[in-house]
Image (cartoon, rainbow, N blue to C red):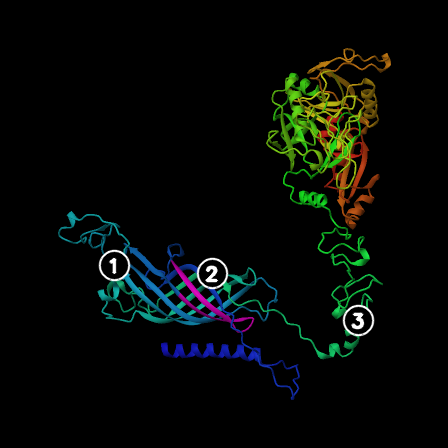
């Protein structure tokens, strides 16, 4: 019986294998092959796939009443396979399998207590069919069935003794003891427990007189499952394979066993439920485009050889310099002539007779030593001296300058919480103060912006003298402030060695700013003048406020020139306050204010100010500008020597019609024009036109308008209200009419703001 089944199985595998080869090699009935052309043989490419998997071995045999095992007590096993595709849907596999198979039966009714564990080692082959000739080619998952033949070995043992060599005796009460229940000394029996160590060879015990039967056999594995493609190289496989064996001795029990050991007449079987990861060792086959000679039958290769695209007289295939300008003389390689050999063609060479070996610029002009030194300094700059910096003066004017140097400032303090009234008024008395919010929770207050370290150090000394003892020099980079090096540890450029021609700022020469750079004196307006030694362009203004009217260029030193006037003279500072709010407002509310100062107080207010003036007329003009921009509640605040003072104390004389009420620093003030706060109902935002179904909904609503956003999208809104409740009512009405994604949006002075900000400004 076993022999006939084996022969039938091998014949079936051979037939399936032959069919797969014939199906690939045989041409289609609808294809006509010319007799003169030999039939091309399909080259076999060995592209093996290796797989490693793990799973559970489940037992099916003579033990247990139902003759199979609960999957929850199955034992672990491993498999390793190598496979090769013959076609897109047939795969040949060679595999090895090893693991443990076992069962434990405890039956107090019939007194049958059997257990065993076998070490299974198997190796075999199978064919896998994945239905690829029916399923789409670009699928990511494929079901499969498999059929094969294997040889396996089983070494079965049973657990008869505990760790102290006590034999197990199973009593009817369910306990295990060291003596039999009918033993004369049973009264002294001690209860013991199984150690689940399978130490006794079943075949050697020969309970049923089977003798030394072979502990190896054949099996027919039949499997089902699914393969999922991860990419071109990796495939995940999950499935179950039933191994139908040709032996009934795996568990040591058969229908020929004696007493209560008798089993059924079927062979013992086992099932492997597994998952595996498979890797394709073969490279992905690249598609090769075949080219026919007919594709070039109308090509004039001679004309191509003589093609001269830039019309310089040199054919393109010999032209080393393509796209030479028309009419420019060239050499035999097609490159423009360069008579002086400086690397710059004659047609763009502003100095055609440069001496041999000299360095030139892009226009062929010889470079002198100072120019080379300057360019090298720019190239190797590691201090940021040549970095581009924009300087804004926050004294109410629109002065702006750009120069190439690291920018320094004086940090007054870094605060996560609000400022006390004393600290706030002291900071607002500093006329060049600025505020910067970092990481959305910390505010850094700084004074001034300086192109060199010495100017920043001088400003710090002035601030320390005014009682701001925590002042320190810093520089800003990538949105963060870093401590600047101590002055004297870093070289300060001066004289002719300074690429941007800043004046000499230190020394014992009496503070003179003149040098070999074409002049360094300070005019009365407080700016430096001079020429750059490289390009003779005017130097940039120094980041100071005012200089003495006598035009002296002295900035420091022990000479007779004296010292610069203080950036913040200990006097009156006038500012325009735009409002004080309980919540922080975004930049969109103050989009047109370039010198905005935000100060958070310790009572939770956010104060917004602009400008810094010592003249009341200038402050009044700036206030008018703010009123015209929509900040109706803007008012002037005066500070002196770290304290808030009234405008009368500041010496302001105003007509009664222009008088403004005094506002406490601890009072919330809404300075915005409420009429500029607009609420609308947004119904959709689209790249172009809305979809047809949305457009149909919009057509049923009166007053829907389209407007362009700052990002180029189209925003569709309905209504325009100064009252938030009216906008909410319209939104609810639109939702009832089917526009479920409608919601209220807010604008101030035409700029999009949050609802919370709008409600704050509308108070």
The circle drawn on residue 307 is: 3
Above or below 560: residue 364: below
Identify the residue shown where x is 63% and y is 23%: 418
- State how far apart marks 2 and 3 are (Cα): 61 Å
Tag 2 and tag 3, C-beta contact below 8 Å: no
Which SS type dominates the magenta stretch? strand
Relative image position of residue 102 (x, y in whole percent): 33, 59
Considering the image in quadrants, where does the C terminus appear? top right
The secondary structure type at the circle numbered 1 is loop
Provide the residue designation for mark 2: 276
Count neighbours of disc 2 (C-alpha within 10 A) and say few if under 14, some if 14 to 19, many if 20 or more.
many
Q: Quadrant of residue 284?
A: bottom right
Is residue 420 at all visible to an observer of this figure?
no
Relative image position of residue 679 (x, y in whole percent): 78, 32
Q: Quadrant of residue 165?
A: bottom left
Q: Earlier in the sequence, mark 1 or mark 2?
A: 1
Q: Relative to residue 88, is residue 584 drawn left or right?
A: right
Q: Relative to residue 300, is residue 583 drawn left or right?
A: left
- State how far apart marks 3 and 1 are (Cα): 91 Å
**Which portion, as a residue range, is magenta?**
76-96
Identify the residue shown where x is 82% and y is 58%: 347
Of badges 2 and 3, the one in the foreground is 3
The circle drawn on residue 199 is: 1
Identify the residue shown where x is 76% and y is 56%: 344
Residue 220 lies in the magenta stretch: no
């Amino acid at each position: 019986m076993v022999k006939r089944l084996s022969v039938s199985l091998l014949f079936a595998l051979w037939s399936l294998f032959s069919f797969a080869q014939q199906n690939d090699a045989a041409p289609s009935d609808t294809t006509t092959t010319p007799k003169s052309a030999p039939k091309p043989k399909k080259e076999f490419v060995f592209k093996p796939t290796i797989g490693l998997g793990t799973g559970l071995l489940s037992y099916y045999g003579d033990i247990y009443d139902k003759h199979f095992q609960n999957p929850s007590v199955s034992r672990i096993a491993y498999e390793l396979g190598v496979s090769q595709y013959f076609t897109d849907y047939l795969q040949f596999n060679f595999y090895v399998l090893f693991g443990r198979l076992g069962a434990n039966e405890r039956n107090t009714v019939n007194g049958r207590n059997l257990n065993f564990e076998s070490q299974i080692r198997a190796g075999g082959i199978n064919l896998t069919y994945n239905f690829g000739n029916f399923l789409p080619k670009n699928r990511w998952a494929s079901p499969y069935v498999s059929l094969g033949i294997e040889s396996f070995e089983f070494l079965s043992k049973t657990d008869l003794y505990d760790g102290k060599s006590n034999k197990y005796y199973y009593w009817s009460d369910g306990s295990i003891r060291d003596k039999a229940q009918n033993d004369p000394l049973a009264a002294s029996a001690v209860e013991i427990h199984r150690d689940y160590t399978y130490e006794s060879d079943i075949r050697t015990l020969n309970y049923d007189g089977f003798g030394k039967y072979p502990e190896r056999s054949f099996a027919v594995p039949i499997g089902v499952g699914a393969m999922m493609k991860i990419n071109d190289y990796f495939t995940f496989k999950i499935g179950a394979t039933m191994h139908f064996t040709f032996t009934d001795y795996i568990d040591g029990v058969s229908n020929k066993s004696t007493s209560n050991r008798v089993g059924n007449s079927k062979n013992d079987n086992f099932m492997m439920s597994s998952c595996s990861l498979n890797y394709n060792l073969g490279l992905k086959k690249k598609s090769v485009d075949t080219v026919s000679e007919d594709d070039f039958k109308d090509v004039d290769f001679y004309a191509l050889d003589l093609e001269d695209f830039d019309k310089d007289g040199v054919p393109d295939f010999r032209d080393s310099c393509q796209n030479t300008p028309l009419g420019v003389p060239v050499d035999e390689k097609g490159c423009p002539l360069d008579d002086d050999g400086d690397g710059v063609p004659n047609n763009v060479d502003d100095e055609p007779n440069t001496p041999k070996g000299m360095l030139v610029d892009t226009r062929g002009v010889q470079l002198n030593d100072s120019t080379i030194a300057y360019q090298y300094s720019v190239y190797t700059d590691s201090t940021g001296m040549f970095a581009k910096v924009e300087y804004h003066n926050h004294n109410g004017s629109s002065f702006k300058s750009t120069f190439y140097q690291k920018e320094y400032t004086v940090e007054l303090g870094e605060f996560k919480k609000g400022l006390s009234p004393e600290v706030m008024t002291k900071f607002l008395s500093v006329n060049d103060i600025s505020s910067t919010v970092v990481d959305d929770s910390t505010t850094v207050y700084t004074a001034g912006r300086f192109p060199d370290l010495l100017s920043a150090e001088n400003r710090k000394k002035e601030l320390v003298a005014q009682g701001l003892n925590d002042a320190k020099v810093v520089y800003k980079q990538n949105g963060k402030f870093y401590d600047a090096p101590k002055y004297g540890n870093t070289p300060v450029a001066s004289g002719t060695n300074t690429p941007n021609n800043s004046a000499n700022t230190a020394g014992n020469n009496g503070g003179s700013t003149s040098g070999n750079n074409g002049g360094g004196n300070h005019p009365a307006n407080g700016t430096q003048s001079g020429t750059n030694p490289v390009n003779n362009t005017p130097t940039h203004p120094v980041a100071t406020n005012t200089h003495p009217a006598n035009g002296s260029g002295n900035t420091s030193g022990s000479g007779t020139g004296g010292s610069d006037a203080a950036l913040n003279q200990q006097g009156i500072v006038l500012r325009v306050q735009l409002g004080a709010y309980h919540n922080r407002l975004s930049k969109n509310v103050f989009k047109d204010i370039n010198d905005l100062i935000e100060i958070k107080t310790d009572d939770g207010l956010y104060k917004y100010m602009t400008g810094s003036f010592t003249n009341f007329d200038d402050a009044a003009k700036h206030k008018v500008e703010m009123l015209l921009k929509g900040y109706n509640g803007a008012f002037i605040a005066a500070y002196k020597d770290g304290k808030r003072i009234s405008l009368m104390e500041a010496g302001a004389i105003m007509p009664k019609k222009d008088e403004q009420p005094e506002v406490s620093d601890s009072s919330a003030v809404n300075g915005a024009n409420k009429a500029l706060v607009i609420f609308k109902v947004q119904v959709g935002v689209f790249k172009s036109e809305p979809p047809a179904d949305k457009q149909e909904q919009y057509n049923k609503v009166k007053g829907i308008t389209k407007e362009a956003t700052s990002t180029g999208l189209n925003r569709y809104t309905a209504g325009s209200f100064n009252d938030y409740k009216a906008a909410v009512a319209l939104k609810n009405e639109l939702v009832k009419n089917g526009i479920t994604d409608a919601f209220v949006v807010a604008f101030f002075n035409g700029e999009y703001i949050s609802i919370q900000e709008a409600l704050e400004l509308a108070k």
